[in-house]
Amino acid sequence: MKLKQRRHQPMNSINTGRRTLGVSFPSGGQAEVLVWAPKAELVELTLNEGNTIIPLKKQDLGYWHLVTGEIKPGDTYKYRINEEQEYPDPASLSQPESVHGPSQAVDVARFKWTDDNWQNLPLEDYVLYELHVGTFTEDGTFAGLEEKLDYLKELGVNAIEIMPVAQFPGDRNWGYDGVFPFATQNSYGGPKGLQKLVDACHAKGLAVVLDVVYNHLGPEGNYLGVYGHYFTDKYNTPWGPALNFDDAWCDGVRRYFTENLLMWFRDFHIDAVRMDAVHAIKDFSPNHILREMKQHVNQLLQETGRPHYMIVELDLNDTRFINPLEEQGYGMDGQWIDEFHHALRVTMTGEQTGYYSDFSGISHLAKAYRDAYVFDGQFSEHRKKTFGIKAENNPGKQFVVFTQNHDHVGNRMLGERLGELVSFEMQKLAAGAVILSPYLPMLWMGEEYAEPHPFQYFVSHTDPDLAEAVRKGRKAEFADFHAEGEAPDPMAEETFNNSKLQWDLIGKEPHQTLFKYYQTLLRLRRELPALKNLDRKAVEAEADEATKTLVLRRTHEDQQVVVLMNFSQEPQQVTVQLGAKQLQLVLDSAAPEWKGPKAAEATVAGGVEVTLQPESLAVYSTSPPSPLSN
């Protein structure tokens, strides 16, 4: 009865209660098949390597539909278009033989969840840890990652952010070349492996953030254009044709990606998504696709009672993306804020090439602490235009900050991590600058113990011509950097293996000390109300360019925390101005226990000068937490 009733609904409507695209098993042992193929004159389902062929019935708006008992969970299938070539399902949940092979029917509702009591964390409490499944552990699987969850809990993070898992060619890829947005990478463990991982994370109090890519698809195994008008010539992206969110036939594309987002939240219990480069999503519709997605996510919340967050990577200082729906914003819950990273990186290294050229260093870092956006209406020399808008009314929980991430490491020619570019003392300072900020901190896998292995760009395309084109493109990109060596071959398995974490280092020095230092920083953030509370109106930041020092003050009710930072290579005197209040030292990165040269004064009052060691950070509080233990 439900199936018959739903057929009379508009075929472009979205059912938040369950996935409808692809092959699903709603009830009664029968499979329901729905594919959007407006370009096709005939669509048939082929089973048993083509020995069983079942025609689909054409519906309105380019959809093809079937209810059948012929296909069961675990069966493989393809669609035959116009009695000619066979292709995998655009909404496939599983590609056991990678991108060119048949799709596999999966009943995601069969998984036995044990997380009924799980409540997503408040966004303001998120401490994120970005990782790549393939290089995080030796075996590079969801199961391998599951074995490290206790380690992540011990570190003090509470939300893991997983780089994209949509099916890509081969078994080595960053994930941004995915071509089956609904299918979970087979070499990682497939859809059941991901469900099991999420369930295990929730059992340990960890939220799961999934990186999704809705701005482009990869080049190999991309069959969407055979079925429908998924792409448009109206716009271009750096990665190829733009997805069609506002041109003719865009309704089917909008539904496709909205159903995908809802699937991750509903069927995989993902807590939040990080949406890749949303500035490359071109949509001039009256209701932007991100806004429409948020409306459907809100509807899902009404049905399940479970909140889910949408965090965007955004190269635009435009609060329209993160303002609430009721203020005509797109309703995104947060955004990555690269400008904090850029200001911090220039302050640490002095590097001012490329997009770093707009940043002066420590004065811009102080502005990032105060205003989130560094450029909020000023002329950008790099962009050759006035750029940005003020983010005065957006709370600190809407901004994610970091010292490094997959892009800022992997897009370097040799993939060097920050630890290979700055001193051990500067690594400690940088960690404090991020973790003690009034924003959501994100760590990049391995930084907490100074992993020396690089994170390099790697792919495993099976098309020889495409593989060679990627090699040549990578070499051309860094043609002017021959003095630093040759760009690693992205197709080589060695490049992938060289990017894996070395877990045996954690028990060795100085890695062990740095790990404990990160633990302490994260504990301070949890236990000091002035650090835990992300009220941006209770933040002051002042920089001294001459001495390369910065004073960050954060308050909550009667508690004050003062963070003193010295980015110079010389000892510096910094004056603490807090009236008659007395402050106690709660953390000093230069203390001998952190392998530093000398600790700062243990207790200071307002107006007292504090001597900061080179490349160090000292944290003072009016009411410190209980004694810190390692």
Image (cartoon, grey):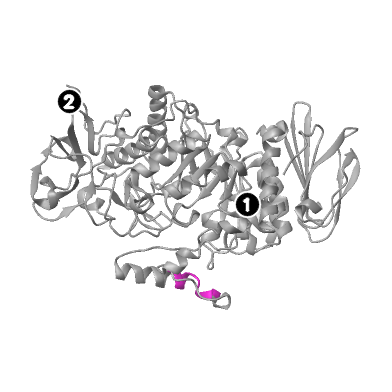
What amino acid is found at the position of numbered circle 1 in the picture?
Answer: Glu
- Mark 2 crowd level (few <14, some 14–19, many ≥20, 10 Å Cα): few
Q: Is residue 565 visible?
A: no
Would residue 389 be found to the left or right of residue 101 on screen?
Answer: right
Q: Where is residue 45, by image quadrant?
A: top left
Q: Is residue 192 above or below residue 67?
A: below
Asked if residue 222 lies in the magenta stretch, the reply is: no
Q: Nearer the viewer, residue 81 or 115?
A: 115
Answer left or right for 530 relative to 404: right
User: Mark 1 or mark 2: which comes first in sequence?
Assistant: 2
Instruction: State yes or no: discs 1 and 2 in contact (Cβ < 8 Å).
Output: no
| x and y percentages locating residue 141 in the rendered image | 42, 51
Q: Which residue is mark 1?
A: 448
Indicate the secondary structure of the residue bearing disc 1.
Answer: helix
The answer to whether residue 612 is above or below residue 465 is: above
Q: Which residue is mark 2?
A: 8
As rendered, which of 568 and 188 lies closer to the eye? 188
- Quadrant of the image containing the C terminus: top right
Task: Give the extent of the magenta segment.
Answer: 474-481
Q: Secondary structure of the magenta portion, mostly?
A: helix
Q: Residue at x 64, y 60 (%)?
A: 419
Q: CA distance from mark 1 to mark 2?
A: 55 Å
Give how far across and how far down residue 472 sits, in percent: 40, 73
Q: Amino acid at mark 2?
A: His
Give the x, y percent position of residue 569. Answer: 79, 61
Residue 537 location in percent, x, y?
69, 32
Q: Nearer the viewer, mark 1 or mark 2?
A: 1
Please state which of residues 315 and 175 is positioned toward the viewer in this rendering: 175
